[in-house]
Image (cartoon, rainbow, N blue to C red):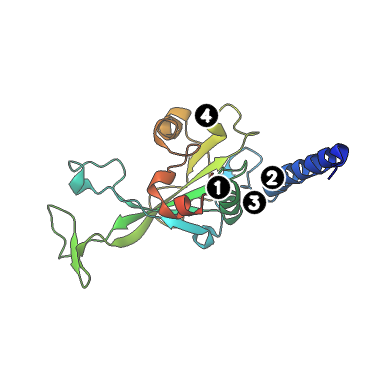
Amino acid sequence: MFFNTHRVLVCALALATVSAGTLIAQDDLINRASFTAEGAVELPQDIRRWVYVGTPLTPNALNGGEAPFPEFHNVYVEPSAFDHWSATGTWADGSQIAKELVMIQTDEGTDPETGANAQVSGVGYFQGDFVGMELTVKDSTRYADEPGNWAYFSFGHSGEPYAATATAFETDSCNSCHEANAADDFVFTQFYPVLRAAKPTQ
């Protein structure tokens, strides 16, 4: 059997081009954040319809009464960014990840030492009221000088309605912790089994 090496080479190049084109097309399909003319990011209106990936909780009772983040953190990934993550195991330029803060539910039955409640399912921590909304955006053009090209925003910590826009935190406020501790490109995928399960195996 004889092989046409020229044809093999052409086919290989075509496949490589298709693969590269697929990745480029996926990047083009990312639903990016909206910004004001002054550069503030606008609050997305459909965050709770994004892909929910999990809710970490570090209560005060387990952190000497002074946890840095004592609320539930409901984390959502914008669907097109999630699709890109699922296809490639990488976070595309334009990715958005939101974190909505929810207070621990308290009532007359709350244990003052642990902050836990006794409910029909047992003693534990249950979600109360919304108290804040945060967003992280990867944008290599707007945030070329930020580590990993990620910027972090808060739309307030006093409950709804949240602010309509937000400006980026200073680099040291968030980026340094994410850079040092996050498992995948500044994202704490190690804490979210939904993200780990969606990541394609190498």
Q: Which of marks 1 and 4 is nearer the N terminus?
A: 1
Residue 27 figure quarter: top right
Q: Which of marks 2 and 4 is in front?
A: 2
As drawn, the residue found furthest toward the front would be: 1
Q: Distance between the residues labelled 3 and 4?
A: 22 Å
What secondary structure is found at the residue carrying circle 1?
A: strand
Amino acid type, mark 4 = Pro
Q: Do the residues labelled 2 and 4 touch (CB within 8 Å)?
A: no
Q: Which of marks 3 and 4 is nearer the N terminus?
A: 3
Q: Judge from the rendering whether residue 14 lies leftward or rightward of residue 23; answer left or right.
A: right
Q: Which mark is residue 147?
A: 4
Q: Nearer the viewer, mark 2 or mark 3?
A: 2
**Residue of label 3:** 31
Residue 36 figure quarter: top right
**Residue of label 1:** 96
Residue drawn at (16%, 61%) of the image: 110
Q: Judge from the rendering whether residue 196 lies leftward or rightward of residue 44; answer left or right.
A: left
